[in-house]
Amino acid sequence: MHRAARLSAILERLADGGSVAVADLADDLETSAGTIRRDLVILEQQRLLARTHGGATAHAVSYELPLRYKGVRYAEEKRGIAREAAAQVTEGMAVGLTGGTTATEVGRALAGRQKLTIVTNALNIASELAVRPGIKLITTGGVARSQSYELSGPIAEASLTGLNLNVAFIGVDGIDAQAGCTTHHEVEAHTNAVMIGCARRVVVVADSSKIGKVAFARICEVGAISELITDAGADPEAVRALTDSGVKVTLVSDGAGRGANP
């Protein structure tokens, strides 16, 4: 396993349990205890954990995986979702993109297009698209959040006022038939809701690990979205609950999308 994948796995275990043990990590990740200790040193230097005797603990009770490590898992699935999303975009459209690793892949899938207007509050997406001559790029202002690279808050929301988007692709930390679309941070949730209000169509792009999950802050109810694009690994019961709620669900497998609705 490459170092980036190990670091991501360690942080995910911290997010789930609040602490990790070197011996357990070495067994689970099939590597040596010395390698795990070196990985923990790297993460401690980035202030993402605190090392303890024989392991490490998270710095806070509420723990969110930083964006730079989120893209390691489900990478192929995210790219497949992005290709399906990009296939819905045609020349001349105005497209909204929130932050998140899957939305970032949508931005990359659109990068070579011509005559598109893309509106985003994500600094990392903006930095990749700013050099693309075929794209008119509009970024919001706002307060930058290091975990997600998103600009949010009243300044970002004021930047969106009066804009009309053909489609907005929304990244989420959870989507559930009852709880709706959710994310870890309440200010980001409100800013994303404002972007949703600017769009004729709203498409949630989320890998299967987010389906049926609920994060802290609600972005919107599922009735506000036009479609969910996810991968075929999504929990069937959670998908069925979403389709029963009227959400069109497109499952992506091997780069091809297929509708889950009857």
Image (spheres, grey):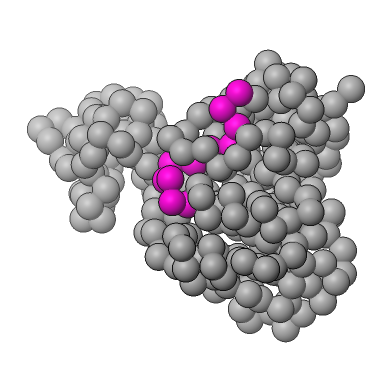
Magenta-span inclusion, residue 187: yes
The part of the image, by quadrant, that contains residue 129 is bottom right
The part of the image, by quadrant, that contains residue 68 is bottom left
Rendered location of residue 44, percent (x, y): 21, 49
**Left or right relative to 147: residue 42:** left
The part of the image, by quadrant, that contains residue 208 is top right
Determine whether 69 is above or below 31 in the image.
below
Residue at figure coordinates x 85%, y 26% from the top left: 261
Rendered location of residue 146, percent (x, y): 37, 59
Question: What is the magenta range?
Answer: 178-188
Quadrant in which the C terminus is drawn: top right
Q: Nearer the viewer, residue 68 or 186?
A: 186
Residue at figure coordinates x 15%, y 30% from the top left: 54
Q: Nearer the viewer, residue 44 or 196?
A: 196
Q: Nearer the viewer, residue 2 or 69?
A: 69
Quadrant in which the N terminus is drawn: top left
Rendered location of residue 60, percent (x, y): 23, 39
**Left or right relative to 233: residue 181:** left
Rendered location of residue 137, percent (x, y): 66, 76
Determine whether 219 is above or below 139 in the image.
above
